[in-house]
Amino acid sequence: MESKKEFFLECYKLGIIKFGRFTLKSGIESPFYVDLRPLASDPKILKHLANYLLDMLPLDNFDLICGVPYAALPMATAMSLESYIPLIIKRKEAKDYGTKKMIEGIFTQGQNCLLVEDVITSGKSLLETIPEIENEGISVSDIVVVLDRQQGGKELLESKGYRVHTLFTISEVCGMLKEEGHLSNDEVLRISDFLQGNEVKFEDKKRLSYAQKLDVAEHSVARRLLETAIAKQTNLIASADVMTTAELLDLADKVGPHIVALKTHIDIITDFDPDSTILPLKDLAAKHNFMLMEDRKFADIGNTQELQFSYGIYKISNWADFVTSQVIGGYDSLNCFRNVGVVAILGMSSKGTLTDAAYQAEALKVAQSHPNVIGGVSQKQIPEELLLFTPGVSIAETGDGKGQQYNTPEKVFADLQTDFIIVGRGIYKADHPEAAALNYKIAGWNAYTASL
Ligand code: S5P
């Protein structure tokens, strides 16, 4: 067999340890994250692993082998195959029908069982597992562990009289990775700090300023938005969810000086007319230097979207600077939005939205790869090369009784590093929309500068 170090580096290639900033189940921030499950997907590695583990052990002591579910199950199986020591299986929960057994397989009372675990941290989960085996009349004297995170688990179990054999410790692993140039000195220091129980200080990565985003932005609409934000010192998009042309134009004129864009739902205007609605709206956009964002949330196949975008009575392509679109129709469905920017709907602000984590991850891939997309609507942070638009913003931070969920401007800049806040009723329903827009403009700009 290769050396232990060579073996570890083979394992490492499978992505079993990641370094960075991770929040553990306990809420503690850790500079590394371990998941050994990928090892079972490489038969050669799994077989070698079984032999490395067996080599450390007084095999004559054991009548049985048992893995702690789930990660250690394949490891224990492989060890059983290599050593001919019989395997038993511990259930995660007792069956709620039939025998209610916790342990499956053939065993007799008084046999001694080797327990196999992938990672040991505090040792508490092993301490809960062992009695479930001992209750069946099987004794446990030894535990073999692939990786010791060195956070007191080994010592805890040893203090209860168990022998703990560990193949790798996290310090040993860091040493090997440093030698191979996979870890910097700083990272090694941070990890050793963490292992000594010190709270780890992560350097807070600063968000990019609008000027920095402008340096790298390629899409002309993204550039104009950023330039306007800088020039007018505002990141506010007012959502004009009003129902008549007169209200729309009145609102646009009042809030225009304070906004970077006006967001419309043009299909809720009851007296829409291209000449009397759109032409004066475009004049106001020019007068106050704001952009027009049509929140159509397209959600169809490319051909239908193309028709909805350019035809019908609204002819959105004639006047909107950018539009929102679901990405549910897939990458190609966004091809029709040439000459405008697309803001992809990645996650929605309403309670019970179906945009779950898996959907958002896939939607994000489409948004990141499509050249027409300038950003996304999301209630989560998104990669900084996309502009983030956050609706559901209110200084009052209460719901609307219809499922809308609100956050304050401070919160969305601090937590999500958003770029633009979208405010609807907080402005157009206010007694003085102009004053309300100015308030949101100031709150949004202060929250942005505070987040830099
Ligand atoms: O997830 C979303 C996406 C959007 S674009 N949640 C939202 O609320 N919106 C829109 O933002 C919504 O259609 C409305 O036009 C605006 C929020 O309005 P408010 O009155 O709740 O501030």
Image (cartoon, rainbow, N blue to C red):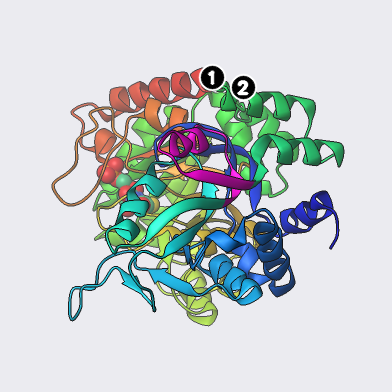
Residue 91 drawn above or below residue 450: below
- Specify which label sits upstream in the sequence, 2 or 1: 2
For residue 219, side relative to residue 30 (left or right):
right
| Mark 2 C-beta to ligand 1 under 8 Å | no
Q: Quadrant of residue 442?
A: top left
Residue 162: within the magenta?
yes
Q: Are marks 2 and 1 in contact (CB under 8 Å)?
A: yes
Dot 2 falls on a residue whose secondary structure is helix
Please rate how many residues cluster around mark 1, counting C-alpha atoms within 10 Å: few if below 14, some from 14 to 19, many from 20. Answer: few
Closer to the camera, 407 or 124?
Answer: 124
To which residue does mark 2 refer? 193
Residue 33 drawn above or below residue 267: above
Closer to the camera, 3 or 411?
Answer: 3
Quarter of the image with the N terminus in it:
bottom right
Q: Quadrant of residue 434?
A: top left
Determine if residue 184 is in view: yes
Three-letter amino acid code at disc 2? Asp
Q: Measured from the top left, where is residue 150 in percent x and y? A: 57, 34
Three-letter amino acid code at disc 1? Asn
To which residue does mark 1 refer? 198
Residue 281's disc number? none
Q: Which residues are magenta?
A: 145-166
Please rate how many residues cluster around mark 2, counting C-alpha atoms within 10 Å: few if below 14, some from 14 to 19, many from 20. Answer: some
Real-space Cα separation, disc 2 to disc 1, in angstroms: 6 Å
For residue 121, side relative to residue 33 (left or right):
left
What residue appears at the point 26 percent right and 34 percent down from the top-left corner?
426
